[in-house]
Amino acid sequence: MSDLTLILLAAGNSSRFKTPVKKQWLRIGHDPLWLYVTNRITKHLPGAPVVIAAHADEIPFMRSVCDFTIVEGGATRQQSLKNALAAVTTPYVMVTDIARSCIDPGLLERLIGNKGNADTIVPVLDVVDTVVYEGATIEREKVKRVQTPQLSQTDVLRRALLSDTEYTDESSAVVAAGGSRFFIPGDAHAAKITHTADLAVLECLGSPSPAVFTGNGFDVHGFEEGKPMVLGGVAIDSPFGFKAHSDGDVAIHALIDALLGAASLGDIGMLFPDTDERYKNIDSKELLEHCVLKLHQLGFVVLHADITIIAQTPKIAPYKEQMRRTLASLVQIPASRLNVKATTTEHLGFIGRKEGVGVMATASVHYFDWKNG
Ligand code: MG
């Protein structure tokens, strides 16, 4: 095992990043950016453990695609770093930000090569422009632009962060706590992704895969007397509704499973556990909206959906067009790419005996193409 752990800080909320996708989940090929950045660095750190600080909501989805240690981030970069440090067992730690996506391997070599030279090894850039501070031109030779990643002694960094002061980088905390800092040449090309336009200048980031993914969903609900019936997001004139924890919109439930299946994001029970009181009697339209938002945040765009309602009763034909338009608007695709059809079971089985309704759904998604908009 390596004597060094890589910490990737990836818990930011991408608030300055104006795409429906969270920055962490932009795809490079098939890999989300957080995984791409981690793999790109660990290629040069053989055997190094990895700890990633992530937003709580994203942790289950991250764990499903990697074996790294993933901890919950905090409200600030520094709190995320503290949480990650608690999981580090090696004497050295390299801390990087997901925004620093295209780190030059030469910089990683310079960091590791200077490991023993101080408590923290820091890449810096010289300033070439004239610098004015509070109205006075100052000696720019004395000004440094500090970059990440930085390499620190784990214990020294942990102690330095016991203070309540918020620092913008590790070396500032280490120096404030009496530790030593050693400068190495940084990488002028290692730009940070903060705004959407920054993506264009990062040549290491290849396009997302153009692949299309398909998922299926299936759901059945029995009838319950006296409950209003909602199916495909539309109120249906019927003496009974559906027995369920939510409003029982079996078409929306099947569609959610198809969407989650297409994006390999588990199933409706994972996203909305029926043990959770928040979802009791909830309008399934809200669940669908939340599911689509989640898909968008994690890097997917919905392409199309097809729904087959299997019912002996009620009659679906009068409502089909309204369902199509309602569902398409919830999924945020043109109605021309959402299809609703209905069939009976010719009086066979529980559906034929008018005990309930079954719905099958198929959906397809692709990655958000951040390169071509
Ligand atoms: Mg259901």
Image (cartoon, rainbow, N blue to C red):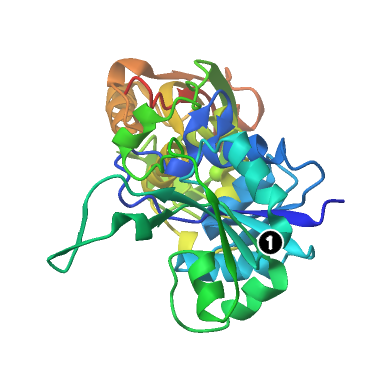
Residue 79 x %, y %: 52, 71
Q: Where 287 falls versus 308 (above or below)?
A: below
Number of residue marks: 1
Q: Where 27 falls versus 279 (above or below)?
A: above
Q: How many other residues sit within 10 Å of disc 1, few (<14), some (14-19) or many (≥20)? A: few
Relative depth, front residue between 7 and 345: 7
Residue 34 x %, y %: 56, 42
Residue reaching furthest right? 1
Residue 318 x %, y %: 30, 24
Residue depicted at 40% across the width and 23% down the height: 369
Q: Is residue 36 left or right of residue 130?
A: right
Q: Where 10 falls versus 76 (above or below)?
A: above
Q: Where 267 falls versus 144 (above or below)?
A: above
Residue depicted at 48% across the width and 64% down the height: 169
Can see residue 143? no
Quadrant housing residue 180: bottom right
> Ligand 1 appears in which quadrant?
top right
Question: SS class of the residue under badge 1?
Answer: helix
For disc 1, the marked residue is 117
Q: Is residue 300 left or right of residue 178?
A: left
Can see residue 42? yes
Relative depth, front residue between 298 and 365: 298
Relative depth, front residue between 262 and 29: 29
Relative depth, front residue between 312 and 181: 181
Residue reaching furthest left? 135
Disc 1 residue type (three-letter) = Asn
Residue depicted at 61% across the width and 33% down the height: 264
Cβ of mark 1 under 8 A from ligand 1: no
Image quarter in which the C terminus is found:
top left
Residue 244 x %, y %: 53, 52
